[in-house]
Amino acid sequence: MSKIVIISGSPTKTSRSSAISSYIENQLINQVQQVSKITVRDLPPEDLIYANFNSPEIKRALSQIEQAQAVIVVSPVYKASYTGVLKAFFDLIPEKGLADKIILPIATGGSIAHLLSLEYAFKPLFSVLGGQEIKDGIYFVDSQISYQENQLTFLDVDVEHRVNTALQELVNRLAEKKLSVQS
Ligand SMILES: Cc1cc2nc3c(=O)[nH]c(=O)nc-3n(C[C@H](O)[C@H](O)[C@H](O)COP(=O)(O)O)c2cc1C
């Protein structure tokens, strides 16, 4: 079975992107996928700020990424890019640490104005870490979703459909890659 890790990049405890991460985790578990989650805000702040490569918590998170075949990154857009706390965590991922992994970027923003941050901010971050198979991202505008205690409600069925299609494509692609390695 392939391993999938979800990295959730909001610094806020109850947040849209955390609710999306939980939704995705449940959808994948329902499809009997081996899925784990890294919530960046739960990592020790000092280890992130001081780039503490020796931190046991950071090492544990990096090992989850190392073992995964796919990485789903969910982050709010802050100042036209991913959040600072997500970048602090990504700074700790070793060079080429995303090589051979399928990456699915998901962003939430207050408006559609920064839709292209997926292209000019998120994707270059994954490429520099060796990510080659970066899927087209999904961008949520706040008005398309509501959440309560990490419980997500889609106010736009089209967005729900897009997420589920992207997850299905990811699962199919992982199965295809596994078959090609075995044959
Ligand atoms: C500090 C800060 C900066 C933000 N910058 C942007 C921005 O540049 N573009 C945008 O569309 N939304 C921006 N937003 C809105 C958030 O991206 C949006 O509300 C997002 O869904 C919040 O996700 P969260 O609830 O998971 O933290 C910003 C919000 C905050 C708090």
Image: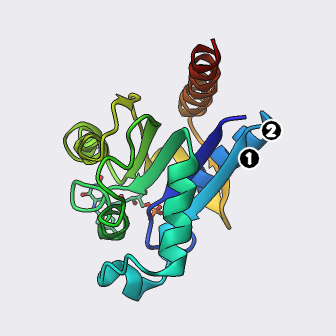
Residue at coordinates 73% horizontally, 38% vertically from top-left?
Answer: 33
Label 1 sits on a secondary structure element that is helix
Q: Report the residue at 33% width, 31% height from top.
A: 132
In the image, taking residue 62 as reference, residue 160 lies left or right, namely: right
Amino acid type at image mark 2 = Asn
Residue 4 appears in which quarter of the rendering? top right
- Splitting the image into four quadrants, where does ligand 1 fall? bottom left
Any atom of ligand 1 within 8 Å of the CB at mark 1?
Answer: no
Look at the picture and state if 103 lies above or below 12. above
- Residue furthest toward the top? 183
Q: Work out whether 88 lies above or below 113.
A: below
Task: Name the image quarter holding the N terminus.
Answer: top right
Residue matched to label 1: 26
Residue at mark 1 to residue at mark 2: CA–CA distance: 6 Å
Residue at position x 29%, y 64% in the image: 91
Q: Are marks 1 and 2 in contact (CB under 8 Å)?
A: yes
Q: Is residue 120 left or right of residue 180?
A: left
For the residue carrying disc 2, how many other residues have a C-alpha within 10 Å: few (<14), some (14-19), or many (20+)?
few
Q: Examine the rendering and report whether any part of residue 98 can be seen.
A: yes
Left or right: 131 with respect to 170?
A: left
Q: Nearer the viewer, residue 129 or 30?
A: 129
**Element type where label 2 sits in the image:** helix
Residue 138 in the image, given as x and y percentages of width and height: 43, 36
Residue linked to disc 2: 30
The answer to which of 15 and 66 lies nearer the viewer is 66
Name the outermost residue toward the front.
183
Query: Which residue is at 31% across, 70% downward?
Result: 88
- Report crowding for label 1: few under 14, some 14 to 19, many 20 or more residues within 10 A (C-alpha): some
